[in-house]
Every structure is written in structure tokens, then in C-alpha cells.
């Protein structure tokens, strides 16, 4: 038996040597056949597994290569360290970067330094977002490989992600110097120039990239982003079309087109693109949230609810999802449901002033003014920017007949000097208090801030009428009608001014116009006025 064992061993060794020679001569398939015979004769011949694994690797049969490398380490755990590096290369080819990183680290612990392994580790670390560690490895590689395109290109990528655009360009320049005919480096340099707002230079580089490779969909998208940055949306959409011709269904192109549609207010098309994206990225919480908001603008309330509830299913403790649902119910006059949803968001995020304020607004609609005031007070205590919450609390105080307290809050709200809503609320409150002179000043401030604010002109005209300044009031109401020629209340106010000025025919005409315009607050009064003016 010992004699036979020696014979098989000798034959296996000869086959092993033959297989190794074949590997060195690039006869990989032939070597695999020979080495497999050697393994049959001697199943523990580690060198045969190792060499066959290398042959499989050259033939890109990486799963088989890994199986052979595993067998080597199983039979001989202290086998030379290169086996870990060889297995790492096959893991990388299969996309198993986590496993590859373990092997490279093990290899480098044993070998100490090996530039190629450090380069591969740098690429993996880059993909993991560990940019500083990645950069260290790639720079180590460049110390002994100073003319490697891939290394300079990877350095350019790393510096780009780190936001160090000047160093990124220096490294990309070296990559282009080494290999001018590769589109990726041109595209990357164009991308960096886009980030630097060097739009003309970015276009030059990106167009060079697509000239070298008309299938570079990402470069077309980047050209589109340059056009978006310069406000040329039509040109951007043409680049999106080019990207989708290059690579049908290219996700970055669909995302860019969706962004453009949103900016242009083409919400139906944007919603369709978002639906396409979400079919491929079903767990993309942020985009589903955007689609929900778009569906609200399209009055697809059921679809918006579906999106928000899907987000809640994905993240059941997300206060933002409850808040969005509450906002939607509030907009649909479902005030009790809105208050319940806002309460859930507050339970999950008790110190968020936006959520607390929103519930206060729901309470206002439910006429629960004390509860509303409590919420607005809490929001004021928590928020850095408080002016809106002071306004809201002032409105609650007005409903509770606390006009002095409301006036104090409105003054605090106006610490933001261009806060039109606060000026309007204070002007209205001053009208209630009969202080028309002060009210006029608030409405005047509004028209200084917004010359197209018809309500400010209208309210100012009303105050001037109450003060007996009919001529001045007439001027202001005409300004209001210049902004909106169908403003029914303004026509009726002008009718009353015409009555005061004994211009009865004009008064009757204005009252009739007010009724034709519709949405008149004082419809009955207008009808009575017309009847009375029939006598003149």
C-alpha cells in the first residue's frame, strides 16, 4: 500500500508541475484538466489547488477560483500570504468587497507592504465612503507607480468626494496626461468644474467625454446639470434625452428630468418619473415623500396618503411622516384628524416647534383657542425664529378677546420687519379698536413691501373712508382694482365712496359690477344699495 501511495504521489507531482508550466504559458483550460487529475490522485496537494485557482481566475471563473483558494487554506492554514490576495481579487471581481477587504487586510498584516494590494484596498475604502483611509492607500501605491492612470483617477474621485476640488483637478490632469483617450477622466474633471461653477470649462470637458464615448450617459447628465445651473432647462432636457438614448432607463437621467419638471411646475410628468424611480428604489423614503407632496398638488389625495403611510410602514416612529399626513388633513378641512396626527408627531418629537405649531393651527380651526394658545406658547419657547409663532398666538388671543396681549405679540412678531402677515393682522386689530390712523400706517407698510397686494390697498381705502377722507380712499381703492380688476369687495367699497361723494350713477354701476364679479362679502347690502339708487 505504501508503494502504491508513493506511485500516485509521484504522478500527482508530475501533473502538478505540468499544470504549473501550462499556467505560466497561459494555457489555462489545459492546465485545469491536468491539475484536476493531480488532485484526484492526491486530494491534499495544496499547490495543485492553488495553481488551478489561479487558472480559474484568469478565465474569470471566480467562484471556482475562490473554492480552490478556500481548499488551500483548509489544508494548509499557514500557506503563503499571497493566497489571501489572490482570493481577494476574485472576491472583488464578484462584487464581494467586504470579503475582499478582510482578505487584503490579512494579506497586508503578513506581507507588510504591497502596493497593488493597497491600491485595491483604497478602491474598496473609497466605495465605503472612508475617503481619508482610501487616499492614504492610493498615495502609497503612487510612490512606486507614478504613472498609473487608475491611481490618479481614483485620487481625483476621492478628492472630489472630500470637496477638495483643486487637488482633484491636479490628479485628474495627471490621469488625462497618461491616457487622453479615456472618457471617464474628462467626465470627472467636467463634474469638478461644475462644482466650481466653471460652467463653460465644464461643458468643454464633458463634451469631450461624450465625443470619446457616446454611451457615457453620466456625462450627458452632467452637461444637463450645467444647463440647469445656468437656467437653460430646455437644453438640459435635451441632454437627458441623449443620456436615455445612450443607456435606456438610466436612473440618474430620470432623476434629473424629474428635478427639472418640478422646477418647471410640470407636476404630472414629475410624478410619473418619481413613480418610475420608486419602482427601482422602493425604499427611497425621501423621494416617496416628494411624490406624496406632488400628488397633493395634483389633488390625488388617496395617492398622497398611500405614500405617507408607506413611509410610516417603513419608519413607524418617524414624526415627519405623521406631520405630513396632518398637514394634508388640515388642508382638506379634516381638522380633528389633523390634530390627532400632529399629536402623534409631537409624542415622537416633543421639542419640535414646527409640529407643535401645526397642532395649534388645527386647534384654531376647531375653535379650541386656549389649546391653540398653549401650543403656540410652547413653540415660542422652543424655536429660534419665533415671529410666525408670535403671530399665531396673537390671532388666538384676538379670538379670546385679549386684544392687549395680541398687540404685544404682534409687535414681537414684527421684530421681522418685512413680515407682511403680522402688519396685516395688526392693522385689522387696530381697525377693531377704531384706531384707523395707525391701521393706515400698517397697510401702507405692506404696500411698500408688496406693491401688488390688493388687500392692503383695500384695507387702507376702508380706513380712509372711515376717517372721512373720501378722495384719498378713492385713490387707494382704484389701486386695489388695478391689481385685480375682478375684486368684488373693492367695487362695492368704491360704490359706497361714490354715494358719499353724491356720484349716484357711478355708485349704482360699481355695485352692479360687484355683484357680477361674485365672491362679494356684502351681497345683500349691495342689492339693497342698487334698489335705493334706482331713485336717482
Image (tube, rainbow, N blue to C red):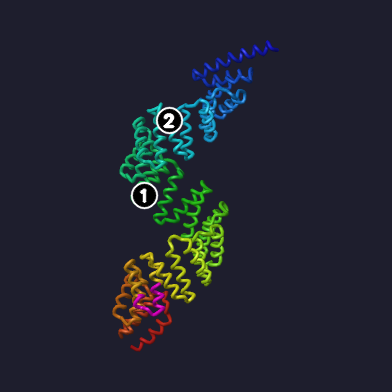
Q: Position of residue 335 (x, y in %)?
A: 53, 67
Residue 419 position by quadrant = bottom left
Is residue 438 found inside the magenta-colored segment of the image? yes
Taking the spot 54% from the left edge, 32% from the top edge, the residue there is 102
Which residue in the protein does label 1 denote?
228
Q: Nearer the viewer, mark 1 or mark 2?
A: 2
Which SS class for mark 1?
Answer: helix
Q: Are marks 1 and 2 in contact (CB under 8 Å)?
A: no
- Image height check: is 87 above or below 466? above
Q: How many other residues sit within 10 Å of disc 2, few (<14), some (14-19) or many (≥20)?
A: some
Q: How many other residues sit within 10 Å of disc 1, few (<14), some (14-19) or many (≥20)?
A: some
On screen, residue 271 versus residue 444, left or right, reads right
Residue range corresponding to the magenta coloring: 426-439
Taking the spot 55% from the left edge, 22% from the top edge, the residue there is 80
- Image height check: is 298 above or below 165? below
Which residue in the protein does label 2 denote?
140
Quadrant location, the N terminus: top right
- Image height check: is 405 above or below 127? below
Tell me, yes or no, if residue 41 can be seen here. Answer: yes
Amino acid at each position: 500500500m505504501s508503494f502504491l501511495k508513493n506511485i500516485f504521489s509521484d504522478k500527482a507531482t508530475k501533473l502538478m508541475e505540468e499544470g504549473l508550466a501550462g499556467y505560466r504559458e497561459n494555457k489555462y483550460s489545459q492546465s485545469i484538466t491536468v491539475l484536476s487529475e493531480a488532485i484526484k490522485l492526491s486530494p491534499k496537494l495544496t499547490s495543485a489547488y492553488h495553481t488551478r485557482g489561479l487558472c480559474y481566475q484568469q478565465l474569470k471563473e471566480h467562484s471556482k477560483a475562490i473554492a480552490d483558494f478556500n481548499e488551500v487554506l483548509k489544508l494548509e492554514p499557514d500557506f503563503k500570504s499571497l493566497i489571501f490576495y489572490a482570493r481577494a481579487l476574485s472576491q472583488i471581481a464578484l462584487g464581494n468587497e467586504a470579503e475582499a477587504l478582510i482578505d487584503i487586510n490579512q494579506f497586508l498584516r503578513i506581507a507588510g507592504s504591497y502596493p497593488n494590494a493597497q491600491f485595491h484596498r483604497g478602491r474598496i475604502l473609497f466605495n465605503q465612503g472612508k475617503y481619508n483611509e482610501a487616499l492614504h492607500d492610493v498615495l502609497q501605491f503612487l510612490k512606486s507607480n507614478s504613472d498609473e492612470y487608475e491611481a490618479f483617477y481614483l485620487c481625483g474621485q476621492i478628492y472630489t468626494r472630500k470637496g477638495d476640488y483643486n487637488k482633484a483637478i491636479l490628479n485628474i490632469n495627471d490621469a488625462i496626461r497618461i491616457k487622453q483617450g479615456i472618457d471617464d477622466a474628462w467626465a470627472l474633471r467636467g463634474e469638478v468644474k461644475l462644482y466650481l461653477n466653471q460652467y463653460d470649462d465644464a461643458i468643454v470637458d464633458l463634451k469631450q467625454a461624450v465625443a470619446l464615448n457616446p454611451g457615457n450617459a453620466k456625462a450627458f447628465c452632467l452637461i444637463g446639470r450645467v444647463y440647469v445651473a445656468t437656467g437653460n432647462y430646455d437644453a438640459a432636457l435635451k441632454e437627458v434625452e441623449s443620456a436615455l438614448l445612450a443607456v435606456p432607463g438610466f436612473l440618474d437621467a430620470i432623476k434629473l428630468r424629474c428635478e427639472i419638471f418640478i422646477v418647471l411646475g410640470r407636476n404630472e410628468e414629475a410624478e410619473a418619473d418619481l413613480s418610475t424611480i420608486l419602482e427601482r428604489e422602493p425604499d427611497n423614503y425621501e423621494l416617496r415623500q416628494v411624490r406624496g407632496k406632488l400628488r397633493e398638488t395634483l389633488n390625488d389625495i388617496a395617492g398622497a396618503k398611500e405614500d405617507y403611510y408607506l413611509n410610516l410602514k417603513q419608519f413607524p416612529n418617524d414624526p415627519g411622516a405623521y406631520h405630513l399626513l396632518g398637514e394634508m388633513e388640515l388642508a382638506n378641512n379634516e381638522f380633528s384628524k389633523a390634530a390627532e396626527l400632529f399629536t402623534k408627531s409631537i409624542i415622537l418629537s416633543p421639542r419640535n416647534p414646527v409640529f407643535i405649531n401645526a397642532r395649534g393651527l388645527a386647534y384654531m380651526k376647531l375653535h379650541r383657542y386656549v389649546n391653540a394658545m398653549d401650543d403656540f406658547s410652547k413653540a415660542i419657547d422652543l424655536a429660534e425664529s419665533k415671529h410666525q409663532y408670535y403671530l399665531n398666538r396673537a390671532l388666538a388671543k384676538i379670538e379670546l378677546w385679549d386684544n392687549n396681549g395680541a398687540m404685544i405679540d404682534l409687535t414681537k412678531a414684527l421684530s421681522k420687519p418685512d413680515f407682511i402677515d403680522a402688519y396685516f393682522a395688526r392693522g385689522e386689530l387696530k381697525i377693531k379698536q377704531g384706531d384707523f390712523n395707525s391701521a393706515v400706517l400698517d397697510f401702507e407698510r405692506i404696500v411698500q413691501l408688496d406693491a401688488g397686494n390688493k388687500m392692503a390697498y383695500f384695507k387702507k381705502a376702508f380706513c380712509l373712508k372711515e376717517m372721512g377722507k373720501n378722495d384719498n380712499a378713492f385713490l387707494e381703492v382704484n389701486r386695489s382694482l388695478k391689481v385685480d380688476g375682478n375684486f368684488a369687495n373693492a367695487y362695492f367699497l368704491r360704490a359706497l365712496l361714490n354715494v358719499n361723494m353724491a356720484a349716484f350713477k357711478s355708485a349704482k354701476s360699481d355695485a352692479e359690477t360687484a355683484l357680477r364679479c361674485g365672491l362679494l362679502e356684502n351681497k345683500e347690502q349691495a342689492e339693497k344699495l342698487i334698489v335705493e339708487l334706482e331713485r336717482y
